[in-house]
Amino acid sequence: MTWLHFPGLSATINSILVNVDLRLREPFNYEGQFQAPHDHELVHLIEDVPESFAVQLFDYIAILLKTLANLLSCGDPQFRLLYTENLVLNFRTPTTVVRGLEAPRAEQRRVNVDPDEADDLLDTMQATLKSNAKAFQAFAASQCDLLSPLIQIGSLEFATKGAVWAHGHNMILAQNDFQWLQY
């Protein structure tokens, strides 16, 4: 990948929206065979364990922001800050594959799961995400000069189907972990 430095390119991102789609009972390719995951694997993914989706989600966001910071800093020795004004993590209604169709996998339809099942899954995912966000350590704002580049998120919002249910402010990426700024 190559990147050209444009003097007018801003190191401020107005907004990033990450839609989280939970696809239930979707077959995956394992050693040439399509297999549906077991229910215990879903529970393991959405509950608060070291391998939960929330940990993986924040890891992917960190990779995205670090990549953007690296691209923006290329050719600009003055680059020190990547600031994202608003990051929204939006859970969409869990879906499943319509059963009984003989269509190829790429042409299968997805439908929303039963509303009660969806509510239970979304509640569990919300609890996992809250638990992970609360576990972020505090980082002294006076130490921000030591980070280069400084990667900061002004506002982090958690939403389900577009409705915000929690938010936090002033988060940074220090080393490899997100941390809340402490003033």
Image (spheres, helix red, strand yellow):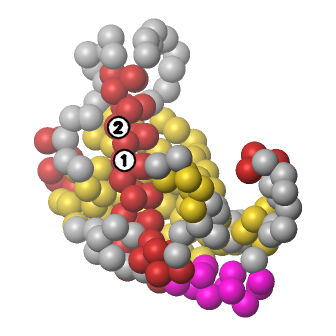
Quadrant that contains the C terminus:
bottom left
Mark 1 touching mark 2, by CB under 8 A? yes
Which numbered disc covers residue 66? 2
- Residue shown at 17%/53% (left/top)? 142
Asked whether 5 falls inside the magenta stretch, the response is no
| Foreground pick, 137 / 21 | 21
Which numbered disc covers residue 128? none
State the image coordinates of residue 73 (x, y, percent, origin top left).
33, 22
| Foreground pick, 110 / 122 | 110
Q: Does residue 26 sit above or below 84 in this rendering?
A: below
Asked whether 119 falls inside the magenta stretch, the response is yes
Tell me if I can see residue 119 in this picture.
yes
Question: From which residue to which does the magenta span run?
Answer: 114-124
Q: Does residue 133 sit above or below 124 in this rendering?
A: above
Label 1 CA crowd tier, 10 Å (few <14, some 14–19, many 20+): some
Q: Does residue 150 sit above or below 113 in this rendering?
A: above
Name the residue beneath numbered marker 1.
62
Residue 131, image quadrant: bottom left
